[in-house]
Image (tube, rainbow, N blue to C red):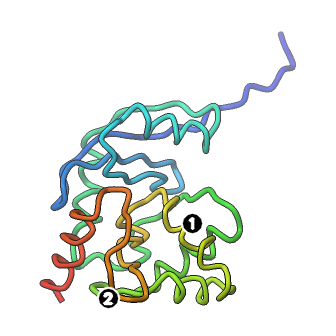
Amino acid sequence: MSNAVRIKKQRITWGTAESPFGKVVLASTGKGVCLLSFGGNIRVELNWVKKKFPGCEFIRDLKKVKGIALKAFNTKTKRGDISLDLRGTVFQKKVWSALLRIPFGKTVSYEQVATAAGNKKAVRAAAGAVANNPVAYLVPCHRVIKKNGEIHNYGGGKKRKRAMLLWERQRM
């Protein structure tokens, strides 16, 4: 009998679900949601997850994913009600933490995010961290706009970002 230790693969539950803003691709580990994307290419999204969680095993579970999506887009869900499993640099995590503090229906500038993450001069780096947020909507990167009030880029498209902001404002 071999003394080799078997390493158990990390299980990633994944699937697609509907949201008020179109179809989402969702993935979660035992720790929490690691991906919520409006990206149209499921293979690209899952390959990104594989890079962040090497050696993972994917298990499709549409029921679980639908439940997460229903909770994610329910206005009664509070921050912290959905566990997250985020992988990123220390600065990215500071930025994502700052995004979590933006109130529902409100917006802030990239400069405000950089300041909240501890480095007012790191506006471009903060914008990069916002753009690399793996759990769109759950970590509300859509609430970040240009200092002049203009809607800036969004991974799911500017039209979707506008729709999200309007949807939130209507539910305040």
Looking at the image, the residue that sits furthest to the left is: 170
Query: Residue under circle 1?
Result: 129
> Quick one: 70 or 51, which is closer to the camera?
51
Instruction: Give SS at disc 1.
Output: helix
Instruction: Give SS at disc 2.
Output: loop
Question: At 35% from the left edge and 71% from the top edge, which residue is drawn?
Answer: 142
Image coords of residue 155 (percent x, y): 38, 57
> Quick one: 140 or 124, which is closer to the camera?
124
Question: At 32% from the left edge and 81% from the top edge, which residue is drawn?
Answer: 150
Q: Amino acid at mark 1?
A: Ala
Give yes or no for contact between labels 2 and 1 (Cβ–Cβ under 8 Å).
no
- Badge 1, how many Cα within 10 Å: few under 14, some, many 20+? many
Query: Residue under circle 2?
Result: 106
Looking at the image, the residue that sits furthest to the right is: 3
Q: Viewed as shown, does residue 88 lie left or right of 160? A: right
Figure quadrant of the N terminus:
top right
